[in-house]
Amino acid sequence: GPELRFYGGVPVFGPSRQVVGVLCVVDPGARDMAADDLELLVEYGMFIEEALQHRWLTIRDALTGLYSRRYFDEQAFTELRRAARHGEEISFAMVDLDSFRSLNDHHGDGHGDMVLQQVSQILAQRFRRPGDLVCRYGGEEFAIVLPGTPPEQAVRLLDAALASLREHAMAHDLGEHGVVTFSAGVS
């Protein structure tokens, strides 16, 4: 191919201000980039950043930072079709915090929000393989998509997540175990 003689670029930042790419201009001819051209390239980069931020806001739950139910609805069927096409196993899990409404009613929404955020962090840390998808499904419910995972393995992973949640020992004096726990089902 032709020899590259000109390259100009600007970084593109994602929603958490990490660099996610570079918007660049390449040309096999030698040239200088005028200040107006550089300014235009920076503006295009900012336009891409705004589009990324908007997409992030539409697929993420504002409270927990997990993927939203809307994103789950978009992706679950796609992952199911992909697994069927490749003859791979896939598991879906629904997680529901035990007696959450009584905790929220007794301690208030602020405390309930803190519990949801901590549980979300635990689930996100436990289910972080490429392709794993952890979503806030609604209220105190979470949906998890586990491509390439047979149901028995999904149950073991959920048991480990529950053990991790219990280790955090978030008090729940109205719950059956005295700490925040969850119930889950796998399909």
Image: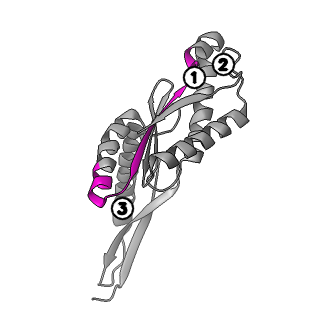
Question: The disc labelled 3 sits on which kind of residue?
Answer: Leu
Q: Nearer the viewer, mark 2 or mark 1?
A: 2
Q: Distance between the Cα atoms at labels 1 and 3?
A: 52 Å
Residue situated furthest top in the rendering: 106
Q: Which stretch is magenta?
A: 81-101
For label 2, the residue is 176
Q: Quadrant of the N terminus?
A: bottom left
Residue located 29% across and 84% down the image: 29
According to the picture, the residue beneath numbered tag 3 turns out to be 41
Q: Picture coordinates of residue 50 (x, y %)?
A: 38, 46
Q: CA distance from mark 2 to mark 1?
A: 8 Å
Q: CA distance from mark 2 to mark 3?
A: 59 Å
Horizontal side of 183 relative to 149 (left or right) equals: right
Q: Which mark is residue 98?
A: 1
Name the residue at 33% across, 37% down. 73
* Quadrant of the snapshot with the C terminus: top left
Find numbered disc 2 in the image and state the secondary structure of the residue it sits on.
loop
Query: Mark 2: which amino acid?
Result: Glu
Residue at horizontal 51 percent and vertical 49 percent from the top: 153
